[in-house]
Structure formats: C-alpha cells, structure tokens
Image (spheres, grey):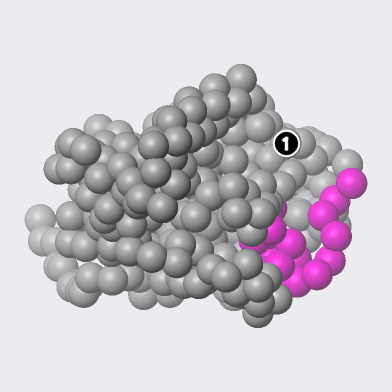
Amino acid sequence: MKRVIYILFVAVLILSSCNRGNSSKVFDTPTSGVIIMAADQSFAPIIKEEIDLFEYRYPNASIIPIYAPEVEVMDLLLTDSVKLAISTRDFTPQEKELVRSKKMRPTSFKIAKDAIALIINKSNPDSMLTVKQVKDILTGKITSWSEINPKSKLKELSLTFDNKNSSTVRFALDSICKGELLADKNIYAQGTNEKVIDYVAATPGAIGVIGASWIGNENDSTNLSFNQRVKVVALSRDGVATAANSYQPYQAYIALDYYPFTRYVYVLDTSSRTGLARGFSNFLASDKGQLIVFKAGMIPTTQQVRVKPVKITD
C-alpha cells in the first residue's frame, strides 16, 4: 500500500507542476509525457516488460503502473483516477454509459488469450481432473482427495486463490461455478500469485487457482514446460479424465480451445484524445507488444497465430 501511495503522490506532483504553467496546454503525446495506468496484478510481469520496452523506445515517455485486484482496477478506471487499464473483462453497457456521462470515450480491445491453471503439490499423484470435479471442489461438494481417488494417501483438500477481489475468483464464480457459491471451508486467499505457488509447493493437499502466465518455466524459452516447484493439473471436459482427453494450459491447447478454462485480456481506455494512453495501448497491439504476450505463454490476439502439428520420431 505504501508503494501505491508513493507512486500516486509522485505522479500527481509531476502532473500538477506541469499544469501550473498553462492549464490549456497538453503535456503528453502518444510517445511522451507521464501517465498512471492500472493493471490486473495477475499480469504484472508482462505489463512491466511491456512498459520497459515502450519506455526504452520512447525515452520521453513515463508510464506509472498500479497493480491491483481486478475489482480495484475497474474502480480506478471508472472513477477517472486512471485513463488506461488492463483487465480480463470488457466494459459492461452500464459502465460505458457512466464513462460517456463524464464526457469521456470508452474504447476496448483484446490483446491476449490467457488461461486459468490449477496447480497441486509435487507429491500429489492425482494430476488429472474433469471440469465437473473442479466445480465440485470449488463449491465444496468434494472436500478430500480420497473422493477423487480412493487410493490417495492425502486427506483434506485445501483450496487457495490470490485475492478475493481478483479476476481469478471472478472467473471461478462465473465460468466454472456458474453462479453457485464458493466453498465456505478450507478456502484461502494468499494475497499474490507468487504466494499461491509458495503455499501449494509447501502443502501436500492444496490445490491452487492461478493465472497460467505465472506457471511458466523461466528457463524454457519454448514455453513447453512449467514451474518445477508444483504440478500443473490436466483438465478434461469428459466424464472421466484420462491421458487421452486431458489437457494442460500449453499455448497450442489454449489457442485450439482444447484446454477448457480460458479468458481474454482487455485494454480499456477512457481517454478522449490521442495521448500517451492511446500510444501505449497501440503499442500493446503492435507486433513488438504482442511478441511479449507470446513469450509469456499467452496467445496474441491482434497478430496472426498459426498452430502447426509436428510429428516427432525417434
């Protein structure tokens, strides 16, 4: 919280000192000036990399990010505290009307296709689940690993998210639970995605719900392996999960919709002119911005992506 307050103070100080000279003068352009933006904390590493490259290319531009749970990100945008945000949902019709009532122009577009991953402890052998089993775990109908596998040596199942106001929780409620309430026992919020991984790595009976961009292996530039501290669950839409019908959130399976839990990442812009907010959002959609999306293990949506089958022979 102290970091956010400091960032806001510095940004306001910079902007207000500029405005004292001439209140009618515009001080930011598509490639220069200072703006504050808000981003879903699930995408903090990617947005940081995007900002670093943008500011390297345009040294006169400074973008100050606020990373927060999705609920707070949208609140910052709709109260006009920021003009640019990264979220996993678009404006609602009511939100668009609210923005227009403030003489602003709401615009949005998709920059990536992402996935929600389930992670378990490395000692847990039950790494394949069906969509129905996941729903039953989230809603508290399944509370122990023995209900999934009678031979399991693990007992009580604990469920963990990053933050109660996060886009991950909203996805679980809207897209998996379909309106049913989450379980009221043995469910925890760790605060950050890093802490979700830490908790699952240390807790044999835990299952974590996390953005797929957080589980990549940093040492693998091909995006064909995952974080070595945990196991990534393979998911099946069918009644019984098998190796033949279960998929992990690899890029190709996300692109082909084989993996069932996918979502889009949106740029939301309320600026009414072509300034730095618009310049950075255009950069995110450009080939260089989309390459960062691709390297993060997500699917670019403004650039053409092709999936080719490859046969491997010994």
Label 1: element kind: strand
Residue 279's x, y, as percent? 28, 57
Query: Which residue is labeled 1 in the image?
Result: 189
Instruction: Name the quarter where the C terminus is drawn.
Output: bottom left
Name, please, the residue furthest toward the right: 184
Q: Quadrant of residue 114?
A: bottom left
Residue 73 position within the rendered picture, expressed as x and y whole percent measured from the top left: 60, 49
Viewer-nearest residue: 122 or 161: 161
**Magenta segment range?**
168-184
Find out whether residue 171 is within the magenta segment.
yes
Visible residue check, residue 141: yes
Q: Quadrant of residue 188?
A: top right
Asked if residue 215 is positioned above or below residue 204 in the image, the reply reads: below
Q: Is residue 237 above or below residue 300?
A: below
Q: Nearer the viewer, residue 216 or 37?
A: 37
Q: Tell how many labels.
A: 1
Q: Give the quarter of the figure containing the N terminus.
A: top right
The three-letter amino acid code for the residue at tag 1 is Ala
Percent from the top left, x then y, of residue 101? 65, 73
- Image position of 247 with respect to 228: above or below: below
Give the image location of residue 204, x and y in percent. Answer: 65, 30
Instruction: Identify which residue is drawn at 28% across, 71% down.
Output: 302
User: Camera-side residue: 31 or 14?
Assistant: 14
Is 65 in front, or is 265? 65
